[in-house]
Image (cartoon, grey):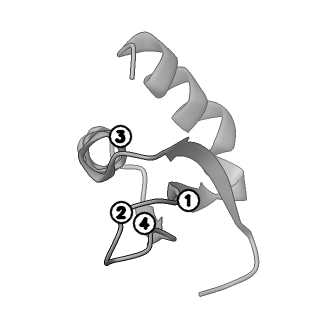
Amino acid sequence: MNNDWIKIYTSTQFFKSEMVKQTLIDHEIEAVILNKQDQSYKFGNVEVLVQEHNRVAALAIISENDL
């Protein structure tokens, strides 16, 4: 993974981050999830990352879809 990936979404609920990721992929924006949650107790954050050049488009899609 290159260093040009940036965080555009954070949630404590995995399914919400997965919804954001899938919506971005449906709009042909490559997105990945970085799960920083503790697997035993489920605390921490789940982040969605996109490449820097897709930042503006990704934020617009998230906003348009009320995610």
Disc 2 residue type (three-letter): Lys
Contact flag, marks 2 and 4 (Cβ < 8 Å): no
**Residue position for label 2:** 42
Mark number displayed over residue 49: 1
How much space separates mark 1 and mark 4, taking CA atoms?
A: 5 Å
The first of marks 1 and 3 along the sequence is: 3
Q: Secondary structure at mark 1?
A: strand
Q: Secondary structure at mark 2?
A: loop
How much space separates mark 2 and mark 4, taking CA atoms?
A: 19 Å
Disc 3 residue type (three-letter): Val
Mark 2 or 4: in front is 2
Mark 3 or 2: in front is 2
For the point 33% across and 77% down, the residue is 39
Q: Position of residue 59 (x, y in %)?
A: 59, 30
Q: Quadrant of residue 3?
A: bottom right
- Badge 1 crowding class, 10 Å Cα cut-off, few under 14, some 14 to 19, many 20 or more, is many
- Badge 2 crowding class, 10 Å Cα cut-off, few under 14, some 14 to 19, many 20 or more, is few
Contact flag, marks 4 and 3 (Cβ < 8 Å): no
How much space separates mark 4 and mark 3, taking CA atoms?
A: 10 Å
In the image, taking residue 28 as reference, residue 48 lies left or right, namely right
The first of marks 1 and 4 along the sequence is: 4
- Badge 3 crowding class, 10 Å Cα cut-off, few under 14, some 14 to 19, many 20 or more, is many
For the point 53% across and 37% down, the residue is 58
